[in-house]
Image (spheres, grey):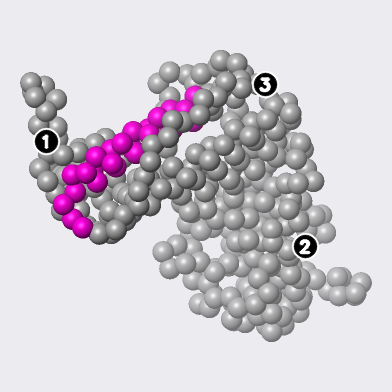
Amino acid sequence: MANQIRSIEAVFLDVRDTLGEVDAPGNFLPYRPSTEQLLDALRQLKLRIGAITSLPDEWKHEDAIKVIRNAVLSQDTETGKLVTIGDFIASEDIISNQEAGAAKPDPKIYEYAARKFGLNPEACLFVGENLIEVIGAQNAGMQVQQKQCPPGRDFAPALVARIGASPIDSGRQFQALLEHEHLLGERIFACGDRIAVWISKLISGWTPKLDQKGWESPPRVEMPEALERAMACFIFLLDRFANQVHLHAEEKMLEVAVACGMPPEKGQWVFDQHDQARAYWAALDIAWRRIKQGMTMTGGSLSMTFRRPPRHSSFSLRRMPSGKITKRIRSQVRCLVILTTLWS
């Protein structure tokens, strides 16, 4: 075993689900703190570090390299300097299927990576979470090591550990937990934005005239059945997931944040934002019911009900600075405005 370790001159790491995760918009979120610990340990062993990744067709090799290398691992608490994957892996040492002309688990991509490093495959170690890809690397002659995914549930044993702080990052593990949980809600809100774009095409060229003495109803439109289903599912998820699971989960995690040292008053803006979101969702419920009342098409649909949103007063008053509004809220307002134009 000792001879085998001494024979390793370079380590090639898989990227996705080995060093981190890719969210829906295409951001790479490294595991904290294990990814930096792994890369730092390999550097201390004086091993050259590379990465082998298979990209989807819509990604360009150069863009993927930037996304991977710019992924933030931590921040120095004294200097404020960000530590990124790029501090450990050079641009030219990230090999993709587009560059190699083969994708994992094809042995050719591993052979290409070793050849680019000027090494025999036997002198290289491949580390990844996917068993088939690990076998592919071994078939190419590389030494291999399968890495658990997720990496030992990193967050649980280090809940109150700091990983660097900044004006927008507390540096505590509870914030990293929230980042991952937040992705679930963001996917729902992204669907709402797509629905708003779809609806805007149906009513293009018409805007309500608010300066008239009486209300001017918009012209009737034929709503595609697929759009009706999408709207019904969107309202369903807002009513039965976004509030109970997404918002409540964040509010519960604030208790952990306070336990980790965050001043309680800093959490008030979260509750204010959540209550504002709940108010928008309640308005969307009403807009959806009115749309259903004015629709002429037939077909099955989900029945939506309005419930009074819960109130929260767990934290002392501290509101978000005036004039600041999140992208998510803007998206919801946009969807609400477009939905209300469909009232008959």
Query: In 3D space, how far apart are the residues under numbered discs 3 and 2 (Cα atoms)?
Result: 43 Å
Out of 46 and 139, give the one closest to the viewer.
139
Query: In 3D space, how far apart are the residues under numbered discs 2 and 1 (Cα atoms)?
Result: 70 Å
Residue at figure coordinates x 76%, y 56% from the top left: 152
Does residue 236 appear anywhere in the picture?
yes
Identify which amino acid the numbered label 2 is placed on: Leu
Horizontal and vertical percent for residue 6? 87, 70
Give the total number of marks visible in the rendering.
3
Q: Which residue is mark 1?
A: 217
Magenta residues? 272-298
Quadrant of res 68: bottom right
Q: Is residue 291 magenta?
A: yes
Out of 288 and 193, give the one closest to the viewer.
288
Q: Which mark is residue 263?
A: 3
Q: Which residue is mark 2?
A: 47
Horizontal and vertical percent for residue 309? 46, 31
